[in-house]
Amino acid sequence: MRTQNVYVVWLEWPEKCFRAGDEDIRFLKSLVPKGSRVVRTRSEEAFLKALPKATHAIVWHFREEWFARAPRLRVLATPAAGRELLPKEGPKGVVVHFGGFHGAIMAETVAAYVLAWARGLFCMAGRGCSVRDWPRTWLSDKCFTVAGTKAVIVGYGRIGRAVGAKLEALGVSVVGITRRAPNDLKSREADLRSADWLVLALPSDTGTDDILNRRLIAKLPRRCVVVNVGRGNAVDEGALLSALESGRLAGACLDVFKGEPTFRRGEPNILARGAAHLPRNLVTMPHASAFSSRYLKECFKELKSDGLL
């Protein structure tokens, strides 16, 4: 007789799209084998109580010592792409899975940044139109088409490739540089010097600190716009601010920052200035590039397609 699968789900998070709701749980139940149980928990205490019977655990975070409480566990999965919240490996016989479905969502965010920048939407942000100030002439030399521009994507894994495919569909030529070959940055200097967009899609766990520093900025053309949807540690924020304020770079769209999510007191951070004191050519978002009402459904679909349900 086949052993019954028990899926223990603990997906509580402040952001609503990252929190498992009734509809998400119903969708998961439609994907798991018949006869399986899906147990939704809403607290650490409830999760640990259910864990001894779990064959699958789908969570945001998991402590190493909890493996000892889970003798039946075969799959430990998180929707997160980052490696910060789960052990990178489990005991023998336990597959640890990190989400890889984010690319399609984040690619739309990067495309939105690129299109909004090129078509003047960010130029007009906070300015608006009025009868007395009709900025049509002022805006006329600030818009361009994205087709024919060039993007260099640093971090060309699943997310980076999805971003590249979306940009290529808009007519952007794409050069991908993998995070596992840092010397690629040195050998791709010609590409950097001709980049209209420098997209960072890097994790924080492979020596990626301050990849975008003064030396790299010096290799970029003044028209270049930096887009970071990976992790904040990849950017030397002081160097970037100086480049934006001096006109050394045309602009930047940052979704992530150093010190997230705590922003500890006294820790250097680009946001410490306050929005009113940031340069106008800097667009900031609160780590939202993967937000989607279908976020958890896409996570469950990936687990199904990967044979982990």
Image: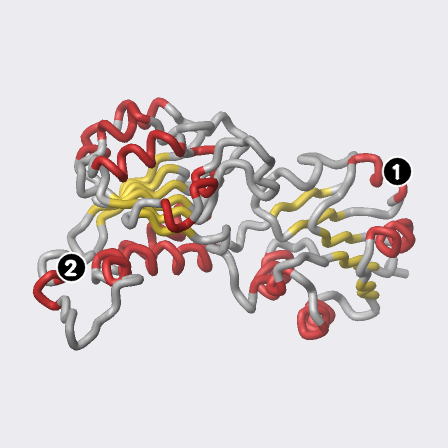
Residue 301 position (above or below residue 53)? below
Farthest bottom residue?
131
Q: Earlier in the sequence, mark 2 or mark 1?
A: 1
Quarter of the rendering containing residue 18: bottom right
Q: Is residue 223 left or right of residue 230?
A: left
Q: Is residue 169 visible?
A: no
Q: Mark 2 highlights which residue? A: 143
Q: Is residue 28 left or right of residue 129?
A: right
Measured from the top left, where is residue 274 in percent x and y? 44, 46
Secondary structure under badge 2? Answer: loop
Whole-number angstrom distance, CA of label 2 to CA of label 1: 59 Å
Badge 2 amino acid: Cys
* Picture residue at 49% right of the left edge, 32% below the top: 268
Quarter of the image for the C terminus: give it.
bottom right
Q: Coloured how?
A: secondary structure
* Picture residue at 40% right of the left edge, 58% below the top: 109
Q: Mark 1 highlights which residue? A: 68
Badge 1 amino acid: Ala
